[in-house]
Image (spheres, rainbow, N blue to C red):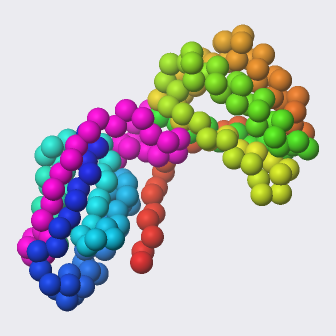
Amino acid sequence: MIHVLTLTYLTPRETVLAHMAEHKAWLREHGDQGRILLSGPRPDGGAVIITADLDDIQVRELIESDPWHKLGIASYAQLSFEGRNASPGVITSPVQDDGVLLINVATTDDAAASVDALASAVDHVAATADGFRGSRLLTSVDGDAMVNFAAWSSRAEFDAIFQDQEFMRRYQAFAETTTGAKFRLYRTSRVITPNR
């Protein structure tokens, strides 16, 4: 389960600020370990933390390890949900799984045509392929290259798309719009969050 943790300050602002460094170190430690996906202050006071896919015991241990919780500086409200969909590149598991991230880089003389052609292939995959988690197509600022980030549940499920003749037809049409393309599969090796 993904958990949205809403923190409400229980002490004066001076106390919150006096223990901010400890809390930020805690956020960074758990961000680097993949347990915290996103965090930040609320405009009306307090803060919000969005966790990775943690079970009830893991999220309770996470909360209890926060210096602000230990010192009674903030209370936590918890909203949990099943994280079925994520933007490509967002990894919700704090531990390595079989998932892979495709990064496909192509040079092109017509970025719009290349994006449209690749989008056709990816739309087909989105409708038919097992293990496809989503894709994000990017165009270079100079318009001479494009990148496709696509997340997959496993390498085997990614490899299976090359047996699909309709995908291959569409991918070939994309390749014809490029001056060169190359892809690689990746897994997360390390996460480093901002230290500020």
Residue 73 on the magenta span: yes
Query: In which image quadrant can residue 178 be found?
Result: top right
Q: Is residue 175 above or below residue 195?
A: above
What residue is drawn where x is 19% and y is 57%?
Answer: 62
Q: Would you say the magenta stretch is mainly helix, strand or loop?
A: loop
Nearest to the observer: residue 46 or residue 2:
46
Q: Quadrant of the C terminus?
A: bottom left
Residue 96 place in picture, x, y as percent: 39, 42
Magenta range is 69-98
Task: Classify residue 76 as left or right of residue 51.
Answer: left
Query: In which image quadrant can residue 73 be found?
Result: bottom left
Residue 144 place in picture, x, y as percent: 85, 50
Residue 75 on the magenta span: yes
Q: Quadrant of the N terminus?
A: top left
Nearest to the observer: residue 178 or residue 155:
178
Nearest to the observer: residue 142 or residue 36:
142
Is residue 89 visible to us here? Answer: yes
What residue is drawn where x is 76% and y is 20%?
Answer: 170
Residue 114 place in picture, x, y as percent: 81, 36
Q: Is residue 7 above or below residue 106?
A: below
